[in-house]
Image: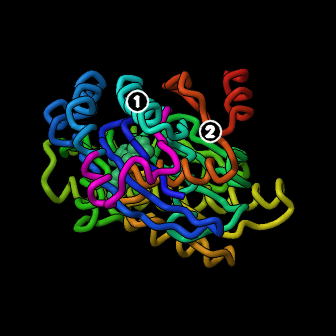
Amino acid sequence: MMVLGIETTCDETSAAVVTRSPSGASDIRSNVIRSQVEIHSPYGGVVPEIAARAHVEVLDHVIAEAMRQAGVDYSELSGIAAAAGPGLIGGVIVGLTTAKAIALAAKKPLVAVNHLEAHALTARLTDGVAFPYLLLLVSGGHTQLLAIEDVGKYTRLGTTLDDAVGEAFDKVAKMLSLPYPGGPQVEEQAKHGYSARFPFPRPLLGRREPDFSLSGLKTAVRLEADRLAPLSDEDVADLCASFQAAVVEVIADRVRAGARAFRDRLGRGPTALVVAGGVAANGMIRESLAKVAAELNTRFAMPAPVLCTDNGAMIAWAGAERLARGIRDRLDVSPRARWPLDPAAAASASARA
Ligand code: KG4
Ligand code: ZN
């Protein structure tokens, strides 16, 4: 089957055409990504209203380009998939409404995809990973360890108690006056910094529950930066390197705890350790996770960076995985700003709060 996927939940406008064979083999026929980074950078972060308008302006062209590059006609598609959340609601509405219009006009099924599910299933698109696997989802808004047991069956093993990892990277970048988006900037600075200069805290290290906490670490960086101000280039590089080293160590430890929780819950180890979400583009984090996977005696799967950050191919693929199981949505399906992957875990967390 061949699916058109549309992604507009944050600051990337993307459309892609992806095929999936009955055996699960995949082919990315096109993956057009138009980033809004330049539009938002004067504001130091994504401005939701501006994002929604920018999606409206370019989405039709992005879809036309994805179809042209794939060399296919709408009549050849098996379905239209769009990210229906979670994300910035204005952008989600733009993508989902466009997908509905195409589905209606082309008389094709519509699939409303959860953006997080798309990140979660990307390793099956890129590496053909079999269920069940352990997923570390690390993006700007989410930091979770999940058991990915089947399409639609996701158990949250652990989550962040405060900031997401990507959010911490972005906030550290901001306090060091590095441009938005912060993650790649901090990684670049860290390359020529001295990571042992600042012994920042490693929150929750050694804790049995596979949860995360980043805000104490972020605050420690802020206090050190305030103490040193005005910062030299060397200070900035050393702060970034020391911060990144702490994050890397915390993530490795939390993933080990996640692997134990996975085994306790499923009575077996994962087929693979998979990392997904924008932060998975970070080279040091990828390297460290490869070592953890080797320790755990499991395969390590990391999609190429362009498929870790937001893109249409992952939406098209998640749509194809759902269509292959006979799952489709009605044309009146609603966009959702919030949409947890494991509703049971989210409900118990909000009951506790
Ligand atoms: O998944 P994503 O593209 O968007 C969502 O949040 O859904 O993730 C974006 C996040 C941002 O916080 C960004 O700073 C972070 O991923 N990020 C990185 C790197 N590249 C992107 N963080 C650390 N190192 C990177 N190389
Ligand atoms: Zn994302």
Q: Which mark is residue 333?
A: none
Q: Which residue is mark 2?
A: 328
Distance from label 1 to label 2 (Cα)? 15 Å
Residue at 39% in and 47% down: 74
Q: Is residue 201 visible?
A: no
Task: Name the spot of residue 290 as percent of width and height, x first.
Answer: 53, 73
Left or right, residue 183 beside residue 304: left
Left or right, residue 42 beside residue 119: left
Amino acid on which the number 1 mark rests in the picture: Ala
Task: Using the rendered view, name the quadrant where residue 186 is placed.
Answer: bottom left
Residue at 30% in and 41% down: 13
Amino acid on which the number 2 mark rests in the picture: Arg
Membership of 177 in magenta stretch: no
Which range is magenta? 64-85
Name the residue nearer the viewer: 335 or 47: 335
Q: Which mark is residue 101?
A: 1
Query: N-terminal of the two: label 1 or label 2?
Result: 1
Left or right, residue 120 beside residue 284: right
Q: Is mark 1 within 8 Å of ligand 2?
A: no
Q: Quadrant of the C terminus?
A: top right
